[in-house]
Amino acid sequence: MAKFGKRTGTAVPTGPGTDSTHSSTRLVLADMQIDLLTAAGAVGTIVDRARRAQGPPLAVASVNLDHLHYFGTGGRWVGALDGCGRSGPVEWLNMVDGAPIAARASALTQRQWPRLAGSDLINPLLDQCEEHGLSVGFLGGAPQTHERLRQVLPQLRPKLRIAGCWAPERGLLGDAAANRELTAEIARARVDVLVVGLGKPRQELWIAENGAATGAPVLLAFGAVVDFLAGRIQRAPDWAAANSLEWAWRLALEPRRLARRYLVQGPPAYVRLQRPAGEVAPAVPVREVPPPAAPSPAPVPHRFAPADGYADVCVLAVTHNNAGDIPDLIASLRAETEDLAVRVAVADNSSSDSTVAELAAHPDVLVVQTGGNLGYAGGINAAAQLAGDAGAVLVLNPDLRVRRGALLAMLERLRQPGTGVVVPLLADEDGSTYHSLRREPSITRALGDALAGRRLSRRPGWLSEIEYDAEAYVYAHPVDWATGAALLVDMPLARRLGGWNESFFLYSEETEYFRRARAAGAQIWFEPAASMVHRRGGSGSSDDLAALMAVNRVRYAQLYRGRGYVAAFHAAVLLSEMLRTGKAGHHKAVPALLLPGRRRRLPRAQHPAGTAAASTADPSTAQPRTDILGSFPEGSIIIPCHNEEQVIGSTLDALAPVIAAGTEVIVVCNGCTDDSAGQARTRTGVRVLELDEASKTGAINAGNSAASRWPRLYLDADIRVRPETVRAVFEALATGSLAVRPAVDYDLDGAGPLVRSYYRARRHLPAARQALWGAGAYALSAEAGERLGLLPAVVADDLYVERFFPAEEKTVLDCPPVLVRLPRDVPGLLAVLRRTYRGNAEQGALGSTALASAAGILGAVRGPRSAFDAAVYTAFTIAGRRMAAAAGTETPWERDESTRAGKQQRTVAS
């Protein structure tokens, strides 16, 4: 089910039937590919594949709201069917099943498409199987149902070949050994069409992982079809089907089993189905370099790879008083050398026990003593200096024991296209599963965890950061992130991401690292075939560490979110700690969250004397190191500047790390009458040009003439950008993109209520999320810059660039956002709007932007507040357009002065 990069709602001939007479039309809805077919076309496609028995097996799924709930946008298993299972690849045919899906598909394609439920197709398919001598097998259902099926089918279809019926226990479906035995038995039966009735999402997940091993050319994920065929479940009457009320009929028959599906899970899936069409971004290739030209050396059993030469995996471990953990860790890793060349590098954070002596007993383990306690991230960065030439790096807690075959299973998953990070299944010492999988932190999840904790484990995913569902630990699937105890990272990706953020010391550093990996286009996969035992004692435990964990959750939000969001998230975390104040390990968290001074008492990196600290107490200003696992990407930053002495300093201070890493930064002061140039010159490594004429496009052209490197980021003088954002921009342009802009966040601190209302509404504009303009930053590759040439004398340079390049050549990156300072008062907002609409009118874009804006604003109205915001937006828009129409040709550059008053000329460098 690979994504094709088509616009949602765009129908194109494609799919499994393309090479036959039964070609389908493929539609993308809620991030799910759906093949639009007639009933005859569906049956023909399936039977053709069963008769040909060539290529990967064809898996057939019925897409209804339940399917979208699990596999569509926001679903727990989104992307889980995209990868290649352990037994080999599977090709998916996703048919319309469900009135809402059929209605949406028909509306978008202007053609009526029928519902193709498995219960409707199974009899025509069995007719064809009987006619062509194809054997049929049934997997799933109760043994009694299979017994009934063996009685009924021969009477109704005497020529139908039944290869076998299998009814595995549910607990065995996640057992790798049991599945190998089951699939081998099915393969021996030579099944042509295997009907898999395990229920959603289990049947689709089982097919994705094991389908190829069954040897069946076709696998039908048809749910309760076996029960229908055996007569154990009554079909809905015709009147219910004709009025799209089959769900109500089934709910009435089985309320306890189906209430959650139809009444709780269905409505949100329906809402996601109705969302406006959007782009499905093509996957960013993770592997940037080919494997070594020379074949990997054969692993030497029970010996670790030396520092020189190539290793399949380099293990990076950080120790601090872990003497008791070293023997088990090393022994388990030595067992893995029977399959792979494994290098082991350990950074010791000044252990006071015999950890170093235990490590010294293993001469083939590479050890670096940090001379202090750098924390987990600092230790990983220190160990990474010893990584050498390796295909991947495995970050590993020292209190883990690797179960046999885990590294090979993780490496095999890592080799799947698009995969950049793989995390294993972690088990506690008693054999129980440790809930290591996590969702991206959010306000609602923090609030849900605060109120429910580990109770109500079946609550929706948007109310829980931790994944509690037992089935999520049975099947391989993409995840947001996982605990940092064990993760395998593709080496090219590790080089792109650079070092771990040392400012966190301990906790949340892995959350930030996983986020950067996702922003780089990599998928994070959970691989249950790789198992490790976690003692969970490597980091220790104390009241101070519990407080640090709570504080770092807020610090992580500060890195990527605006102040309003951070305040709400902070309140949710504080509530969680207040509710648990009486419990061990929580009484220091509340003061640390409320009093910034208390945070300075929390554990932090202790560097050896005479060395510069690589971290700071505040991750919102700290940045990942650029010297780990590769250099910072090359490029130039051009900043046009007109009377910006109040803000240019803070903009350049935020860029200090990338300047130190070698990025060329040019500030072009144009028509300045203040000390903008003087402020810029006080920053080391910044080149300053001065032009007499006040012209932004003239400044950009002059900067292009002076710059010596590509790609180039064009940055407004009042925009704050982080080094990891610059990295993401430069890397995207270096790997094929032509024109990009980073994500954007608004700084509304101190803004009046009408200004806030205007920008709340503006966030809903499609162009605000998809266009190059509006962020105060865009970037071009060398090819794009050569095509663009000199910018004409226009007010809106970003609009000109946006209109110059077609949609397929532009990308809005999912990366740490730039921070845009927005007007604080109404006069400031009107000044910005007058300039904006002057620029639009100058390029003849007023009409097109007006229609798109109206549609976006009206479509976002959901209640009184959003209706008020829409009214405010409309009023300001009308006022801005009228002011722009009244402006003369010699109108000076309008800008918002409210964000510049009283700004500090110098800020502390990150």
Image: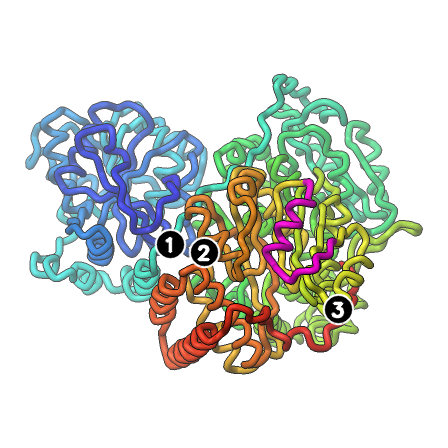
Q: For the residue marked with disc 1, what is the amino acid?
A: Gly
Evaluate whether residue 846 shows in this view.
yes
What residue is shown with label 1? Answer: 278
How far across and down, in percent of the image, does residue 556 sit? 64, 61
Contact, mark 2 vs mark 1 (Cβ under 8 Å): yes
Q: For the residue marked with disc 2, what is the amino acid?
A: Gln
How far across and down, in percent of the image, does residue 7 sit? 35, 48
The Cα–Cα distance between marks 3 and 1, rounded to whole angstroms, is 45 Å
Work out which quarter of the rendered image holds the C terminus and state it.
Answer: bottom right
432 above or below 135? below
The magenta stretch spans residue 864: no
Secondary element under disc 3, as helix, strand or loop, is loop
Secondary element under disc 1, as helix, strand or loop, is loop
What residue is shown with label 2? Answer: 770
The Cα–Cα distance between marks 2 and 1, rounded to whole angstroms, is 9 Å
How far across and down, in percent of the image, does residue 783 sit? 54, 38
Crowd rating for badge 3 (residues with CA inside 10 Å; few <14, some 14–19, many 20+): some
Q: Is residue 815 left or right of residue 547?
A: left
Looking at the image, the residue that sits furthest to the right is 610
- Give the total number of marks visible in the rendering: 3
Q: Is residue 67 left or right of residue 490?
A: left
Secondary element under disc 2, as helix, strand or loop, is helix
Q: Nearer the viewer, mark 3 or mark 1?
A: 3
Marker disc for residue 674? 3
How far across and down, in percent of the image, does residue 69 sit? 35, 56
Earlier in the chain: of badge 2 and badge 3, it is 3
Evaluate whether residue 425 shows in this view.
no
Per the rendered image, the range of residues in magenta is 689-708
At x 42% / y 48%, what residue is drawn? Answer: 807
**Quarter holding residue 146:** top left
